[in-house]
Amino acid sequence: MSDLPESPTPELIPARPRLWRWILGTFIILISWLAIGAILTAASAALFGLDLLALAGTDKESLAIVRGYEPWQAASAVLISFLPLLLVPILLHRYLLKRPLRELFTRSNRSFSREVLIGAAIMSLLLVVTGIPDFVFNNSSYAWSFDAARFIPYLVIALTLIPIQTTAEEVFYRGWIQQRLENGRRSIWLVSLLGGLLFALPHMGNPEVSGNLLLPILGYGSTGFMLTWVTMRDQSMGLAVGAHAANNILAGLLVSSSDSALPAASIWVTPEIQWGPAAFFSVLFIPLFIWLTGKWKGKVAL
């Protein structure tokens, strides 16, 4: 998230915590996410009477069981597990790395909330504009699935827990990880490529990913590349936080796929993700999102 000149002066570069502190912190974050997240999901599953093994499974039998649950309950049990991924990096940034809390989110003087709204608005615009042609010319692939009794409670969960999930991922990837990748001299292309790859790898365990991994890696990696780029240009993860939340919320509320990683109560449902078109649009979004946010040019070394 550093927007620095090509030959930065020392006073412009935030002090980098010792590497051992960052490695220790990363280990604590991952262990906390896995352990505490599992406990939170197990508690939610017990509260709602859900099969914990089915929630954790990616096979067709498990997915079929999960899709028989109320979407808001299943989504709650899955999404609550991201709470440690949000809170633990924040605590460690402040008390282990001993850095100002604001620095984790932004080094800019601009309004962070305004950046979030801009990122969300632009991503929503791109999703709607690129989705309309497919809806018109490939309408037979969209099945109407709106059910108010299932949609309304899911809407509440989507607007509360999905932003927690997506912000947690951004805090970890665009905050904790990216700030270590940057040193004020590394190329924005290199940092964005690494950021995209690291963002893609954990998503390879999602149930919608199967067979050839190249296209899913390209699809998720392109999104990670795009969010890393604008964060580095902007000195703030606000645009990335807004865009990521908008993408996941719209996927849950408007159009979801039958093999989606998260249970949803969307208005329309499509068959399994076609990774060719999905990867194509993910790559297409890179220049469009960066251009619309005005982050092509800046003081970052190219």
Image: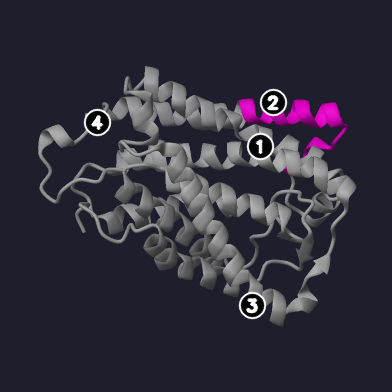
Q: Which quadrant of the structure image shows residue 17?
A: top left
Secondary structure found at label 2: helix
Residue that numbered label 2 is attached to? 39
Is residue 42 covered in magenta?
A: yes
Of the 4 image quadrants, the one containing the C terminus is: bottom left
- Mark 1 and mark 2 lie on one chain; the one further toward the N terminus is 2
Secondary structure found at label 1: helix
Q: Which quadrant of the structure image shows residue 287?
A: bottom left
Residue at figure coordinates x 34%, y 39% from the top left: 110
How many neighbours does mark 1 have within 10 angstroms: few (below 14), some (14-19), or many (20 or more)? many
**Residue flagged by tag 3: what amino acid is it?**
Pro
- Mark 2 and mark 3 lie on one chain; the one further toward the N terminus is 2
Extent of the magenta region: 36-56
Secondary structure found at label 4: loop
Reply above or below: 203 against 23: below
**Residue flagged by tag 1: what amino acid is it?**
Leu
Secondary structure found at label 3: helix
**Residue flagged by tag 2: what amino acid is it?**
Ile
Residue at figure coordinates x 75%, y 29% from the top left: 42
